[in-house]
Image (cartoon, coloured by chain):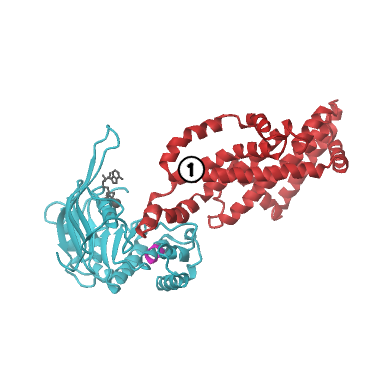
Chain colours: A red, B cyan
Amino acid sequence: MTSFHEFSDRVMRSITDLATLSRSRELWLSIAFLIAILAAWEWLPATFGIPAFILPPISDIAHEFVRLYARENLWLHTGVTFAETIVGFIFGSLLGMITGYVLGRSRTAEIILSPYILMLQIAPKVAFAPLFIIWFGYNAFPKILVAILIVFFPIAINVLKAMHAVDPALVNLARTFSATRAQIFWKIEFPASMPALFAGLRIGSTLAVIGIVVGEFIGGNRGLGYLLIVGEGQGRTSMVFVSIVLLTLIGLIAYLCVLGLERYVLHYMPERSHANI
Amino acid sequence: MDDATRLEFRHVDKLFPARNRRITPVVAVRDVSLKVARGEVVSLIGPSGCGKSTLLNLAAGLDRPNAGMVLVDNKPVTGPNFHVAFMLQNDLLLPWRTILENVNFGQEIQHTKRDVRTRRSNELLARYHLAEFAHHYPHQLSGGMRQRAALARTIVMDPDVLLLDEPFSALDAQTKMILQNDLARVLAEERKTALFITHDISEGIALSDRVLVMSRRPGTIIREIIVDMPDRDHPFRRRSNPRMNAYVVEILNLLGLTHGDGKDMPEVPLEEIGGAQ
Ligand SMILES: Nc1ncnc2c1ncn2[C@@H]1O[C@H](COP(=O)(O)OP(=O)(O)OP(=O)(O)O)[C@@H](O)[C@H]1O
Ligand SMILES: [Mg+2]
């Protein structure tokens, strides 16, 4: 998890560096690399005789995008998946935060509940999707529920760890000022947990979309997961690719939102130490 | 018992029970009795692990003695009390608060009105030469400035009793002397009562009315040395007082760090007397 953060932070830094044009050479090289990859994708498969239904050239994918946009309500499907992802992520995060803070505050709650939370984490959460569809039907609810389950754990665990790691000397300092338990939480423990919370949110933001897509695979007739399955059924490989690209974009947007919020909330941190949690 | 006593330990024992069978319980301090009068500054000096910090925690109400009593203003200490303030080696500034907000911290817990607390904090920051850093974050300040901010946070609460646990030991020699001077002036001007822990023998002598020397663990007070020199509010001057050295040698002898007539210099550098933290 940590290495993912460090990596993503390095990437963001490189992008900022590139964007400032202070390193225009690297910027051009990076764009050249992208063009090279796209060009290879466009022409190499044909050269090697790979059929389009295995690896459609970029131009096919672009055409498919336009077709889906014009005929298949592509924005509706994208919007549905996007909205479900965001809702699942927000509620999963809230549930994870509440769990983390409650368990962090109460040793008893931690002892009683943590075995079951661990079991829940070990259970493959996407396997719950059919169950939720049986329970709640072909609507957005089961999909959001799967996303909540997936997002919940990394956030709860990060918050819990942060609560354990709060410097007891800081708590004692607050106590010498006669702070109440609630004041200790809101003025020390909660702010002290922010870096770890954001580390969890970052992970959660990239996972939420998984829960939604799996839900859409098996139930309903909306969303990018549904388009993906239709594309597969009709042998339209480029339709699958369009869905994958848009799903990635949704994950990326969620991730960047968290990153932006993190920059804002953790503005007090020394430069570049955000992800070292 | 006289009215002038602010802080008193009466036959205090503190032991830390063994958490498992492989370790034995630790008797940290045994039968400690001491009194600090109103406006008096008393230093505690003793080998590392002899229970100095433990005594301070008891006085702050963060912990309870196993036997005996700790009294502030002739009343037994039952818990933290904001008339008794604490300052440690680590500045314990909250990284998510600016310097001004850090100085406000204790007042905020006491629900002091916003304009009142900001005015008071700003006054102190100006007096401690930190006015232009009021809106900086702790990591943007030097160690000495941070410790000054911690002192401001302590003093702004106008505590009657100050408990200082090696507050300057992490600073370089020059900064340390400047801060010693600042502290001595504040203590004298505001007629504060203070219990001051230090490993630096000359610091203890330069700043206090009395020095209490403790034995190895289980710690108990083996000697009281009355510092009969003027200028308690001016450690610079005290340091150049010809009697200074006699006191240092006396304490070194008590700690078993010199032999014989006290003319020979210590074989152990001062810094090592306390050992590693
Ligand atoms: N919470 C605790 N649990 C168990 N043992 C403790 C605890 N706090 C302190 N002790 C023990 O009590 C003894 C005294 O500790 P204390 O921190 O008071 O020493 P000290 O005189 O302040 O040492 P130093 O000069 O190194 O700061 C030590 O032997 C330590 O191991
Ligand atoms: Mg100590």
Left/right placement of residue A215 relative to residue B214 reads right
Give whichever of B219, A29 is nearer the camera.
Answer: B219
Q: Main secondary structure of the magenta part?
A: helix
Give whichever of B157, A112 is nearer the camera.
Answer: A112
Q: How crowded is mark 1: few (under 14 residues within 10 Å), some or many (20 or more)?
A: many
Q: Where is residue A241 in the image (x, y as percent from the top left)?
A: 79, 35
Provide the residue span drawn in magenta. B148-152
Is A39 covered by the magenta stretch? no
What is the secondary structure assignment of the residue under circle 1? helix
Q: Which residue is located at x 56 percent, y 43 percent?
A: A95
Query: Residue B35, relative to residue A18: is it above or below?
Result: below
- Residue with the mark numbered 1: A160
Q: Which residue is located at x 73 percent, y 45 percent?
A: A30
Left/right placement of residue B18 relative to residue B151 reads left
The N terminus of chain A, quarter of image:
top right
Q: Position of residue B73 (x, y in %)?
A: 23, 64
Is B151 covered by the magenta stretch? yes
Amino acid type, residue under disc 1 in the picture: Leu
Left/right placement of residue A245 relative to residue B226 reads right
Query: Residue A192, relative to residue B191: is it above or below?
Result: above
